[in-house]
Image (tube, rainbow, N blue to C red):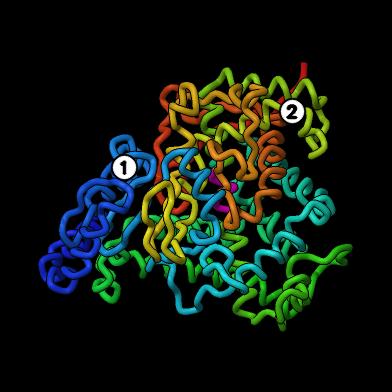
Amino acid sequence: MDYEIAGLVMALLLWAAAWALLAQRTRRLQEELGRLPPGPRPWPVVGNIFQLLGAAFAPHQSFAKLAKKHGPVMTLHLGSMTTVVISSSEAARVMFKNHDVVLAGRKIYESMKSEIGNEGSLITAQYGPRWRMLRRLCTTEFFAAAPLDAMRGVRAKCVHQMVQYIRDAAANGLGIDVGRFFFLMAFNLIGNLIFSKDLLDPESETGAKFFYHAGKAMEFAGKPNVADFLPMLKRVDPQGIRRRTQFHVKRGFDIAGEFLKERMEKGSSVEKKRRDYLDVLLEYGGDGEEEHVGFAPTTINIIVFEMFSAGTDTTTSTLEWAMAELLHNPQTLHKVQAELRTAIPPGKKLQEEDLEHLPYLRAVIKETLRLHPPLPFLVPHMAMDSCNMLGFHVPKETQILVNVWAIGRDPKTWKDPLEFRPERFLDPDMAADYKGRHFEFIPFGSGRRICPALPLASRLMPLTLGSVLHAFDWVLADGLKPAEMDMRERMGITLRKAVPVKAIPVPYVCL
């Protein structure tokens, strides 16, 4: 942190030297100020960077406070980067319903730019023909209803295997890092989907390394970086954010690449009854709409790495927050366990077909996503051309941040928004689902850039959480009381819990 602050101070001290180079752009922005959405008055050159650095490097909180003063559509000038922040469901509705195409570009931060490029990326590639081809591949081959139904047994196997791992760990009566077991399940699930095999076990050093590097990459990539705001500092990387992010990305990329290399050299180690994701990638020749001749090895590695990193990090974060909120609210924990144990007899494993009979469990997942969306700003959008939105001018290449965290805590939409209350999603008038059509609740985004893995996540998360709540009673470790839990956030691209959940699993026995 000292290194980062020193780098930040050094960068900001250079603003005077940058004045002459950026004066013309500053004057032009000031001329446009009347047409842009309202916002706090920018300082010369550095703009509103200091507002970004408030609230202990938690920009989603800082921007939510500023939006209360300047409105749900707000302009911030972060150095040379013009940013429009969307902070209400009404503004998000207009953005996604009326301007989805023009705002479907992607703002790529310096920390995420690597030597291998991003053309194989669904997350960071710009909107265009190649991105649309990759998107269609995911929605038709990976996450459509038919392939998801075919993989139901794979998901059940990975979840029930995780329960057994927890049962083994519970034998010594000590607390466990709950998030690590969720990560293990998610990693092995993706391993089975891509390679048709488990890749990790609880003692695996490889899993611990990937968990560490993926988490660090997400953490550093989400930090405010003055090199994004003052282009002259890109080569200097004064805070070291790009260097450190890419260090961890490369380590995680190498781990995923080793699994890919092993499969390519040896082939599948099991008799497969279905094509896995790697088979699809290797055989894919296009979908008839555009010419396509196979994927380069680097592109396949990028796709594989993204599935592992994004899939494990967001799933782990959401499930850990769910456990944290339940342990923090014991009455809610008891209520969801009572529903599970009434619907599912002791000794019987929870299955996906049981989920439709467990409305309170599904409400717990939704309430967790409302309070703790995995990506508080989604992944940043960018205006591919100028447009007019809600009477305001949005210039080309403007960064668009949708503050999903603020939308989920908006008192105009949610009663007692800071309370963890799953019952709100049992209200017949609250028909919000995950599909991006109810703009007060868009944890997975909306429009063309909505998370393609949403259909998988909506099945996996209640199955996983329900399984551990059905099989075990949970007690906080080290004598900690629910009211004493540290519920602070750790900011990165994903919104992780600052202090990991440690709890003692007690196998449930029906008397």
Q: Is 143 in front, or is 298?
A: 143
Q: Which residues are magenta?
A: 311-317
Task: Assign a secondary structure to mark 2.
Answer: loop
Question: If you read the primary sequence from the N terminus, does the residue marked by circle 1 or circle 2 appear first?
Answer: 1
Residue 9 at x, y = what percent?
Answer: 17, 59
Residue at 46%, 66% (x, y): give it. Answer: 384
Residue at 34%, 46% (x, y): give it. Answer: 74
The residue at which mark 1 appears reads as 62
Residue at 52%, 22% (x, y): give it. Answer: 329
Q: Is 103 in front, or is 179?
A: 103
Residue 146 at x, y = what percent?
Answer: 83, 54
The residue at which mark 2 appears reads as 358
Marks 1 and 2 sit apart, C-alpha to C-alpha, by 37 Å
Q: Amino acid at mark 2?
A: Leu
Mark 1 Cα shell of 10 Å, populated few (<14), some (14-19), many (≥20) = some
Q: Quadrant of the N terminus?
A: bottom left
Q: Is residue 348 magenta?
A: no
Q: Is residue 349 left or right of residue 399?
A: right
Is residue 174 among what the camera can see?
A: no
Q: Amino acid at mark 1?
A: Ser
Q: Is residue 313 magenta?
A: yes
Residue 215 at x, y = what percent?
Answer: 48, 55
Q: Is residue 110 above or below residue 372?
A: below
Q: In which quadrant of the rendered view does residue 294 lie?
A: bottom right
Is residue 398 among what the camera can see?
A: yes
Residue at 59%, 73% (x, y): give it. Answer: 120
Disc marking residue 88: none
